[in-house]
Image: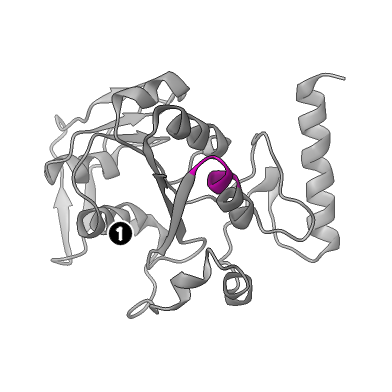
């Protein structure tokens, strides 16, 4: 039996188990619902995110780029960022405006959005049609990790485990917000949430994993991995 067929059958089995357990996933292993506080509280690695409640109302998911940008400015020193699966490149644009060298890695060429909301000033910012950011219009390859300091994946389908492996190989940091189990090489054991499964995998790969939470609706818990 081919690896592709094995993976497909494993995915179908996982979907069946989730449905029998009363879990919520959509097609192809996509799960974007907020994670129950009970699941977080029962995890020694994820429980710290409950210690600091999010202020105010949660924002729409479309503001996740601005929120992650601000978190990175508040928590990290500038470094070379690979924005893996970066789509239109708004996160990369915001980071570069803040002095961070950042590059989008995404196989689908896209232009920057024409406008975005600056959350600090509550103003719409319009970008000129000529505005661009550095892009690599290709799928992420592990060898690319050597050119960056931080690998970021806000929503990288099927790339979370590969990104962790690449970060481990080149001793780089990573920031991921896992929600999808699409084309991933592993699946969580029965009774283990996908996010916990990713934490466990990164820990075994040699990372200290720090969870954090961004104030937007849906799966808003990120993992910051630092090589030990």
Quarter of the image for residue 74 reads bottom left
Q: x, y percentage for residue 73? A: 20, 54
Q: How many marks?
A: 1
Quarter of the image for residue 140 reads top left
Above or below, comparing residue 24 to residue 65 in the picture: below
Residue at x 64%, y 36% (from the top left corner): 184
Quadrant location of the N terminus in the rendered image: top right
Q: Nearer the viewer, residue 201 or 132?
A: 201
Q: Is residue 73 left or right of residue 135?
A: left
Q: x, y percentage for residue 80? A: 24, 34
Q: Nearer the viewer, residue 205 or 1?
A: 205
Q: Nearer the viewer, residue 96 or 59?
A: 96
Q: Nearer the viewer, residue 27 or 202?
A: 202
Above or below, comparing residue 178 to residue 153 in the picture: below
211 part of magenta stretch: no
Q: Which residues are magenta?
A: 201-206
Disc 1 secondary structure class: helix
Q: Is residue 131 left or right of residue 188?
A: left
Q: x, y percentage for residue 75? A: 25, 58
Above or below, comparing residue 92 to residue 59 in the picture: above
Residue at x 37%, y 35% (from the top left corner): 172
The residue where tag 1 is placed is 67
Residue at x 37%, y 78% (from the top left corner): 57
Query: As drawn, which residue projects farthest toward the front?
Result: 228
Residue at x 30%, y 37% (from the top left corner): 89
Q: x, y percentage for residue 208? A: 45, 51
Quadrant location of the C terminus in the rendered image: top left
Above or below, comparing residue 167 to residue 144 in the picture: below
Dominant secondary structure of the residues highlighted in magenta in the image:
helix
């Amino acid at each position: 039996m081919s690896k592709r067929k094995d993976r497909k059958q494993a995915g179908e089995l996982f979907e069946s188990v989730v449905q029998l357990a009363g879990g919520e996933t959509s097609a192809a292993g996509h799960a974007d619902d907020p994670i129950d506080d009970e699941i977080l509280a029962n995890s020694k690695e994820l429980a710290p995110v409950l210690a600091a409640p999010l202020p105010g109302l949660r924002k729409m998911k479309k503001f996740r780029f601005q929120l992650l940008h601000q978190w990175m400015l508040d928590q990290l020193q500038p470094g070379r960022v690979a924005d893996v699966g970066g789509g239109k490149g708004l996160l990369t644009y915001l980071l570069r405006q803040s002095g961070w060298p950042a590059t989008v890695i995404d196989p689908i060429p896209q232009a920057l959005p024409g406008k975005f909301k600056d959350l600090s000033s509550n103003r719409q910012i319009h970008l000129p049609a000529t505005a661009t950011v550095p892009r690599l219009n290709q799928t992420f390859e592990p060898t690319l990790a050597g050119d960056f300091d931080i690998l970021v994946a806000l929503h990288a389908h099927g790339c979370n485990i590969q990104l962790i492996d690449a970060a481990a190989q080149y001793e780089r940091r990573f920031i991921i917000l896992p929600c999808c189990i699409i084309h991933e090489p592993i699946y969580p054991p029965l009774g283990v949430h996908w996010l916990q499964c990713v934490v466990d995998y990164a820990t075994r790969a040699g990372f200290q994993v720090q969870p954090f939470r961004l104030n937007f609706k849906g799966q808003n818990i990120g993992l910051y991995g630092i090589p030990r």
